[in-house]
Image (cartoon, helix red, strand yellow):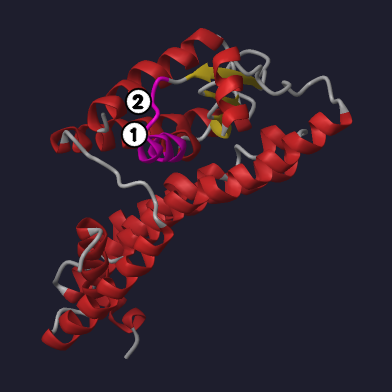
Amino acid sequence: MLPYPLLSLSLVVMWLALNGFTLGQLILGSIVSVFASWGMAALRPSKPRIRKWHLLPKLLGIVLYDIVRSNIAVVSLLFGGGGHKRRSDFITVPLDLKDPTGLAILAVIVTSTPGTAWLEYNSLSSTVLIHVFDLVEEAEWQDLIKNRYEKLLMEIFT
Amino acid sequence: MTPLDHAAGLPAWAAILVSVFLIIGAGLTVIGTIGFVRLPTFYERIHAPTLGTSWGTGGIVMASMIFFTVLATRPVVHEILIGIFVTVTTPVTLMLLARAALHRDRAEGNPDVPSEPPVPPSAAVQAEKA
């Protein structure tokens, strides 16, 4: 009946947030979410397995903080700040994370943080090509992605 | 009555808060757009609009939530959905554009672009079997 309970629940919550909470909307939203999750099941995506729920707020906090920080950094760079000649370049980061959902979340984190862009993941060599707007030290960025985000994601999705 | 007719009833603290978030959000979006026009290469240009898709959107969404929450005297939070969907869909278009550019540059033999990573022997064997 409900192949993706979390998806169905989120859809009902979204439906009620947009349409207001009434009994009629609850029934209608539930019907829509059941059909939508059947549609999702037909696509056969891999089922995400979240092991440690309590780490999700920590990850969200770290990411929101980093997004604010890098917004400020990129704005000051665009106005010619930084005190040095800006060098943009590609870096390759080897990843141990294999879970598709974890990788998707890592891609969202890297992309939504201004200054880094996730370009392409190579599943054969398990490496990702990232473009960095202001590359000072390559090892520093690899360390950031591996220790700050990937480690936490690996704990959440094992 | 449109919501704007009620805006006069907004308390000063809320008006200031809304204005601050609106200016931050709109300002970041404008700066990102200017950077998008001015930066020299494709791979640098993709960084600038992410200002608009992260805290540019975030600031405007926050302003909207505060404005309507104070006016309606009940929590109005469905704007969060805009933030979530913008954040989650940005990488999709970005990867599509970036990989198209990478493919083009590699095909042209552009020396500034890294070539595809070498495939480790063990993985190459697996790929042939598959």
Residue at left 68%, top 15%? Answer: A85
- Depth check: A114 or A7 in front? A7
- Give SS at disc 1: helix
Q: Is residue B65 left or right of residue A53?
A: right
Residue A149: assigned label: 2
Please give the residue where the numbered disc 1 appears in the rendered image. A63
Query: Left or right: where does residue B109 sit relative to residue A83?
Result: right
Asked whether, in this view, residue A15 is left or right of residue B97, the answer is left
- Asked if the residue under mark 2 is in contact with the one under mark 1, i.e. CB atoms within 8 Å, the reply is yes
| Residue B57 versus residue B73 in the image, above or below | above
- Above or below B83: residue A36: below
Amino acid type indicated by mark 2: Tyr
In x, y percent, where is residue A140? 47, 11
Q: Amino acid at mark 1?
A: Val
The question of residue B100 being in magenta is answered with no
Which chain is indicated by disc 1? Answer: A
The image quadrant of residue B79 is bottom left
Q: Is residue B50 left or right of residue B67?
A: right
Q: Residue at x 43, y 49 (%)?
A: B87
Depth check: give the residue in front, A137 or A107: A107
Rendered location of residue B113, percent (x, y): 75, 24
Q: What stretch of residues is rendered in magenta?
A: A96-108
Q: Pick whichever, A56 or A83, lies toward us.
A: A56
Q: Is residue B39 visible?
A: no
